[in-house]
Amino acid sequence: MKLDVEIGGLRLKNPVMVASGTFGFGKEYSEYIDLSKLGAIMVKGLTVKPREGNPPPRIYETPSGILNSVGLQNPGIDGFIKGELPFLKKYDVAVIANIAGESVDEFAYMAKKLDIDGVHAIEVNVSCPNVKEGGMAFGVKTECINDITKAVKKSTNKPVIVKLTPNVGDIAICAKAAEDGGADAISLINTITGMVIDINTRKPVFKNIYAGLSGPAVKPIALKLVYEAVKSVTIPVIGMGGISSASDAIEFMIAGAKAIAVGTYNFVDPYCTMKIIEGIKEYMKLNNIDNINDLIGSLSTEI
Ligand SMILES: Cc1cc2nc3c(=O)[nH]c(=O)nc-3n(C[C@H](O)[C@H](O)[C@H](O)COP(=O)(O)O)c2cc1C
């Protein structure tokens, strides 16, 4: 059975990855699962300088997902290279470094620094809703997506994956802007903006008022946006948003996602990615699919 897929020159042993910010740098999860069994690890979003992130509360649970306002807490690019990458290098797994700059130059600077052994691809987060500077402002403007993609492409030889925000009017033009900028792949969705109010204080729960919604609640929206993105570009699309089971993952692949990432559900069940890989294999066996690529984009819309 062939489970390997190729994403813009990057070969993955299977299409199941973990989404940025929900898996740290792998250490905690390595106590539960063999990291080498994953298709890839998308590491926590990196910034030029270390960041402490936003003040608490940072996570709020809803009936079918969570809102987060972590604010890109991370050790900075040098902290990642010196402190985290050596651990990840011990595993036979693709490492995708997620970067979040505050300017085009910062994105380019980080991409250049990460053009090193042990980093297999760069994921460009043009879409973080929790950082006041840049973040969302970049991701909603097609010129910005295009400029950042071009600058990152010029600074690295690694495959470049552009991560899109769902908080836009037309995902197709954002996907196209990334493709036109030279992206090797796109990934989506990042979290959907939401808010919560404490009825006793009558104040927003989060200091930034808004936070990012993820988990099962966002899956149907994510699936639709991934499908729209797939239709608008020729580069591979990595789908994520609310995936918690093999059947969720398979839905995204039928819609055309070449690979998928699991985010919030890692917090619920640290073994979920292993279960998803096994579930995909079972589905393939049951449906006589020898090569996962035969499943990708197999949606029939004829009614
Ligand atoms: C706590 C938390 C932190 C996140 N941090 C990042 C981040 O640093 N960079 C990024 O690109 N996405 C980040 N995300 C977004 C996820 O990678 C993913 O796109 C989103 O949560 C949708 O997938 P899910 O519903 O499976 O969680 C974060 C999500 C959560 C829940």
Image (cartoon, grey):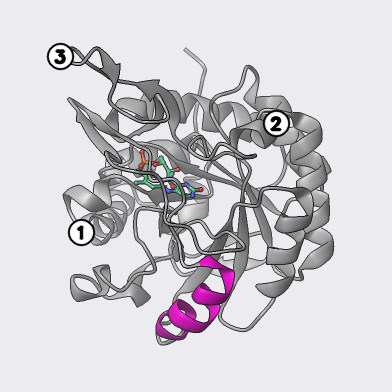
Compared to residue 296, the image places residue 89 above or below, namely below
Three-letter code, disc 2: Cys
Q: Which residue does the image show at 36% across and 77% down from the upper left?
A: 36
Q: Which mark is residue 96?
A: none
Q: Is residue 46 left or right of residue 26?
A: right
Q: Which residue is mark 1?
A: 270
Q: Which mark is residue 200?
A: 3
Categorize mark 3 by other alpha carbons within 10 Å: few (<14), some (14-19), many (20+).
Answer: few
Three-letter code, disc 3: Asn
Categorize mark 1 by other alpha carbons within 10 Å: few (<14), some (14-19), many (20+).
Answer: some
Disc 3 to disc 2, C-alpha distance: 40 Å
Compared to residue 232, the image places residue 284 above or below, namely below
Q: Magenta includes 79?
A: yes
Q: Are marks 2 and 1 in contact (CB under 8 Å)?
A: no
In primary-sequence order, the first of circles 3 and 1 is 3
Q: Which residues are magenta?
A: 76-87
Q: Which residue does the image show at 50% across and 75% down from the upper left?
A: 79
In the image, residue 228 lies at what x, y percent?
A: 59, 26
Q: Which residue does the image show at 46% across and 86% down from the upper left?
A: 86
Can residue 182 be seen by looking at this rendering? no
Picture quadrant of residue 141: top right
Q: Which residue is mark 2?
A: 174
Q: Nearer the viewer, mark 3 or mark 1?
A: 3
Disc 3 to disc 1, C-alpha distance: 35 Å
